[in-house]
Amino acid sequence: MERKRMRRFVAAMLALVLLPGCTRTPPSLEKGENNDPNKSVYHMVYFNEISTLNYLVTDTEVDYALCSNMVDNLVDYDSYGNIVPGLAESWSSNADMTEWTFRIRPGVKWVDCNGKEICDVTADDWVAAAWYVNSAVNDAANQYIYSTGSVVHNAQEYYDYTEYLLLSDGGKRTTDEDGNELTPVPEVKPEDIGVKALDEHTLVYTLDQPCPFFLSCLSYSSFLPVNRSFLEQCGDMFGRSKENILYNGAFRLAEYVPQERRQLIKNDTYWDKEHVYIDEIDARFRRDILEVGPETFLNGEVDQVLISFEAMDKWMADPAAASQVHSMRPDIAYSYFYCFNFEPEFDAVYEPDNWGKAVRNEDFRMALMHSLDHRALAEVYEPYNPEILLQHTVTPDTFVSFEGKDYTDYAPFEQIMNRDSHDPEEAKKCRDRAWDALEAEGVTFPVKILFPYNPSIINWAEECQVAKKQMEDTLGTDFIEVIVERGPDTGFLSSVRRSGKYAMLLCNYGADFADPATYAEPFSADNTYNFWDKSDDPEIRKLFEEYASLTERAAKTYDDTDARYELFAEAEALLIDHAIIVPSRVSNGEGYVADRLSQFDGQFAPYGLARSRYKGMKINEKSMSMDEFNAAYEQWEAERLKLSK
């Protein structure tokens, strides 16, 4: 599903990750702390507080930073993104992948926040979670993963029924609070959901359609287990405090004071505790996090510092500090691309009808595409190594592969991957062809291009200004007029993108599971990205119908991964070859850091909870340099490709 935010390394990532501190005790620590030198204590600072401890309802990475370390998944990940056993020690599926059976690891314990054993983890814990998440009463933001991608049998139907009961006051009302007529929904019981416990250690998921990537869907908090008796005992208080959740993961929450402190302690009963190398994580709330300087890092008061562009000169001027600054691994969980709006709904002053005629012309779109220099655009976010972010496709490089062949290496992408879409001369040729054709259709020039941005996202406005200059300098202000407009600080997606109040827009999309189908979703029927499925232009309609046919055939090809990927690649290449959208880059994660914790030691997956977990991580004596990081990243990518074979 789409993400409701675009992440930037200074503002957003402060809200997305906990920032590690040091293994030494800073002077500000409170009395009574365990300062045993034999323990690996990880002191951390953080900026934004979590919204809830109720992992069954959250879909924010702020909250994942805690819940992913306190409750385990059915499946786990290694440091290269390979799925390995977690709380399920084994699994299997039927021939058409509509039924998945998991053998739950015996002897795993639920403990309370003090480490006291409460009961065993059983298969029913996942059944209880499915009932809770799919009940509209609980308003779970992460419910969608049951009904998109995995399509668990009757999950959405049960949600729709419980939502109807809520709106109709148990069926007593025929209209909702706004006076809209309510259509009765057939009764669906929680027992009808396709999640069953055959015995204490056998769990079965039944799906409505074949799903070869189902294991990757299990990486979200909505598929985490919960003890039914404890959940019923807590009622509405579940997840309201550290006492109102149980733990079966690598850590338990021993102390939690909002906007002050949270302390994670290694779970002594954890089933895989020999791979948990940190004994204690002590996190302190600190608003001035970006003011931490190189001297604080170098003297050992903190183990990780996020470094803003403004501070880079100061860091690079100190040889000791400069040798420990590096980029972050590109975040292939998020793909960025430019969308053209084929169904404009913006104000008349921006001439939506004129834009609507122009955007239907492929040469017009190609002119805009070829005028964009994505390397220069990436420099807005990564001035020292922009190439690391660049993408030729919507589905990022290395996102998925089959038998060692990356998805972007499939034949339909061959020309796309081997060319630079930035081609000013070709842009001008396309412009000239488009100008003649559009003028004959009554289009007036310059064509106004409403190009809004979200002011709450750092550097978005700057990127828009760079893109405006590129397009106008290449194509001429007598051909186009790019209007960069500030959007609202809040509710940007609903009031701008989903409402069609733009001509051209930088968009992003986050993967939900390990399959190309996840990146096909933004451009499917009833999408709120570019509305091309709503166009009445014959050529656009023809392209959309071809795209829809390819993705439908691909989705039904569940028993031949190679053929499946080929079809999805053909569909995505159609989008790019006809400039329906313009791929740009991936996220640069946290930007620049000095960090004694190597990200290559931890779990990895470009979706779900894995990257938020501290299991497997070790605290190093020093941070990597830029060269060391680049070499480690190259080695990691090569090893990942090798293992995928």
Image (tube, grey):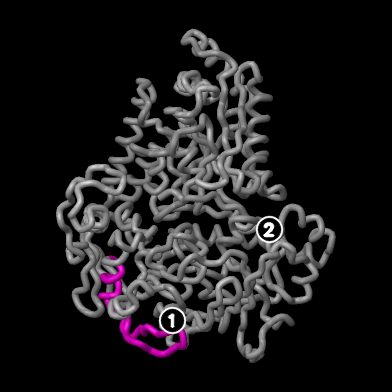
Q: Secondary structure at mark 2?
A: strand
Furthest toward the top, the residue is: 440
Magenta stretch holds residue 121: yes
Measured from the top left, where is residue 273 in percent x and y? 47, 83
> Quick check: can you spot residue 248?
no
Q: Is residue 595 above or below residue 557?
A: below
Left or right for 28, reference 83: right
The span shown in magenta is 104-130
Q: Secondary structure at mark 1?
A: helix
Left or right for 299, reference 511: right
Image quadrant where residue 22 sits: bottom right
Left or right for 622, reference 553: right
Q: Is residue 344 above or below residue 443?
A: below
> Label 2: how many residues lie within 10 Å, few (<14), some (14-19) or many (20+)?
many
Could you tell me which residue is drawn at 24 percent across and 64 percent down? 205
Could you tell me which residue is drawn at 51 percent across and 32 percent down? 502
Measured from the top left, where is residue 580 in percent x and y? 46, 31
In this view, the residue in front, 353 or 567, is 353
In this view, the residue in front, 138 or 520, is 138
Magenta stretch holds residue 362: no
Could you tell me which residue is drawn at 56 percent across and 84 percent down? 279
Furthest toward the left, the residue is: 186
> Label 1: how many residues lie within 10 Å, few (<14), some (14-19) or many (20+)?
some
Q: Amino acid at mark 1?
A: Glu
Residue 243: assigned label: 1
Q: Amino acid at mark 2?
A: Tyr
In this rendering, which labeled residue sits more in front, label 1 or label 2? Answer: 1
Q: Is residue 169 above or below residue 489?
A: below
Which numbered disc, 1 or 2, marks the residue that appears first in the sequence?
1
Question: Mark 2 sits on what residue?
Answer: 592
> Could you give the CA–CA distance between mark 1 and mark 2, rounded to whole angstroms?
37 Å
Could you tell me which residue is drawn at 51 percent across and 68 percent down? 65
